[in-house]
Amino acid sequence: MTAAFDTLATVVQPWADLYADSATLATAVIAVHMLAMFVGGGMAIGADRAILRAAPATAEAVRAVLADLSTMHSVIIASLVVTFLSGGALFTSDVATFSVSWVYWIKMGAIGALLLNGLRLRRAERAVLHPLANMPIHTTEMPVAFPKREWSGVRSSAVISLALWLSIVLLGVILKNR
């Protein structure tokens, strides 16, 4: 462990002791962590599935898929915040173990990649919606050329999101059993 992690371990030792001495507290922290991941990841995987199944041919279909996604973003982001906070509580419960675990650091890298991919997805969504902004909501044909390149960005972000969410859960299981 580095000096910075040694210092952190010393600072958070009261928390680590409390966590170690209370099965109820440990269970609650793990439950909050897992439930937040379940909600956020479940919503994200559902959204990714909708994107990958969608073959929008009308402006209305494009708007419907992306409007549905935009309503999910706040829930997913809130879930990620709760996951991050509860993950911090788990990390500080045993700094010595987690700070030297390569599995932990790969998981943190995957979470960072997930956040960057989320930003990429939001940008791609806006690029798809921009040409449709002033078009009629209900139409049987695309009023403008379908933004294929932008939609492929949304789809590739969905594939990456799926892979990252599954990887994060797998790494969490490996980490728990090491």
Image (cartoon, rainbow, N blue to C red):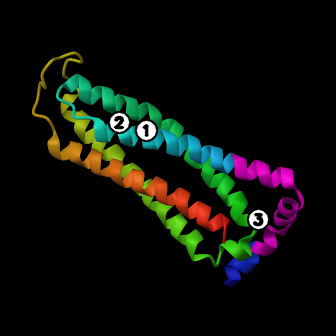
Q: Mark 2 and mark 3: span between their CA atoms?
A: 38 Å
Q: Position of residue 60 (x, y in %)?
A: 24, 22
Q: Position of residue 133 (x, y in %)?
A: 23, 27
Q: Residue furthest bottom?
A: 2
User: Would you call the spot at circle 2 few (<14 residues within 10 Å), some (14-19), or many (20 or more)?
Assistant: some
| Mark 2, residue position | 50
Q: Are marks 1 and 2 in contact (CB under 8 Å)?
A: yes
Magenta span has 152?
A: no
Q: Residue furthest top?
A: 138
| Mark 3, residue position | 93
Closer-to-camera residue (162/129):
162
Residue sitting at 53 percent across and 43 percent down? 40
Q: How many marks?
A: 3
Closer-to-camera residue (30/114):
30
Q: Earlier in the sequence, mark 2 or mark 3?
A: 2
Q: Are marks 2 and 3 in contact (CB under 8 Å)?
A: no
Choose mark 2 or mark 3, whichever is in front: 2
Residue type indicated by callout 3: Ser
Q: Residue furthest left?
A: 145
Residue sitting at 75 percent across and 69 percent down? 94
* Disc number for residue 46: 1
Quarter holding the C terminus?
bottom right
Residue type indicated by callout 2: Ala
Q: Using residue 151 as the reference point, say whether residue 32 is left or right of it.
A: right
Q: Using residue 129 as the reference point, say whether residue 29 is left or right of it.
A: right
Q: Earlier in the sequence, mark 1 or mark 3?
A: 1
